[in-house]
Amino acid sequence: MILVLNLNASVDKRYTLSDLKKGEVQRVTAVDNTPGGKGLHVANVDTILGEDTLVTGWLGGKPGEFIADRVQDYGIRGDFVKTAGETRSCLAVITEDGAQTELLEPGPVVMPGELAAFQAKYTQLLKTADVVVASGSLPRGVPVDFYATLCQEAKAAGRKFLLDTSGQRLAEGIKARPDFIKPNKDEIEALRGRPVKDEADVVREVQAFLDDGIPLAVVSLGAAGSIAGCSEGLFRVTVPHIECRNPVGSGDSFVAGAAAGFARHLPVTDLLRLAAACGTANAMEEESGFVRKDTVKTLLPQITVTRL
């Protein structure tokens, strides 16, 4: 089973309007409310791929109920811990010029008892998991090194642990040596305090992660694919040219493909090919964190993985 941790879920509200003018009353032309969170994207894609998948985390209030109901509607298995605080909402305002303005709430404050309840549930769920995926931010009240703690427990139980986060959460998480990370250039620059300007810099950073004891590190190059490194060497992953409809969620879909690859015990080149196919398939859809299984299958032979 793939156990997905979505600890700071949100109701994602998407408003469409002609223009965004400060201090004025404006009419929204379209609105869309969906369950949000990087982990939910991962769980959705892995469920579509046919993997035995379960998502967990904290949910609270009416927004939490909305997310739990919609997750069930999507056919995703969920097992959540309730919080007294209300699950956050995140607002994206899209204007006719294509600009997207995002307003992200911080999320509820998780109380000590709620933190302990989640840790107990995690220990229970870990017994039947093969792969754990930790994605996104942490709500208030949760220690910044919480992912590292969860990683250590998973690895002690012989489970694979994939980490997709940023900032201090990533810095602390790396210390526990997760089996997979996928930072982008901006996240690496914030983490290392040095610029990542070209491919040579990317290769340097991937090698640095390997030296830190990370078994598989991947850095995205956007439409140009990605650079990956593991004990077998460094690899360039190249994807085909596509008509991009919505790139949001492509990174999460890449992680979902990687998780499926770990669950299927694929060789690293096949794992990277599946991950890249999922990330590319997501970009071809309007919906974020969504792929079509047939599209992934069609893309697989078009993904090349070459040794550097």
Image (cartoon, rainbow, N blue to C red):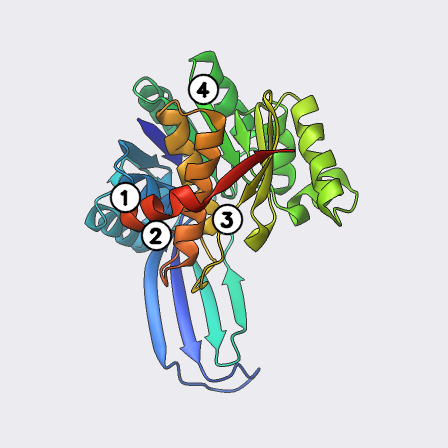
**Separation of marks 1 and 2 at Cα, in angstroms:** 8 Å
Q: Which of marks 1 and 2 is nearer the N terminus?
A: 1
Residue 221 location, x and y as percent?
A: 61, 49
Q: Residues within 10 Å of mark 4 (few under 14, many from 20)?
A: many
Q: Is residue 210 left or right of residue 16?
A: right
Q: Name the residue under label 1.
A: 48
Residue 239 disc label: 3
**Separation of marks 3 and 1 at Cα, in angstroms:** 21 Å
Q: How crowded is mark 3: few (under 14 residues within 10 Å), some or many (20 or more)?
A: many
Q: Which amino acid does label 1 sit on?
A: Ile
**Separation of marks 2 and 3 at Cα, in angstroms:** 18 Å
Q: Which of marks 1 and 4 is nearer the N terminus?
A: 1
Q: Is residue 95 above or below residue 159?
A: below
Q: Which of marks 3 and 1 is nearer the N terminus?
A: 1
Which of label 3 and label 1 is nearer to you? 3
Considering every residue shown, the one lying at the far right of the view is 194
Which of label 2 and label 3 is nearer to you? 3
Q: Which amino acid does label 2 sit on?
A: Phe
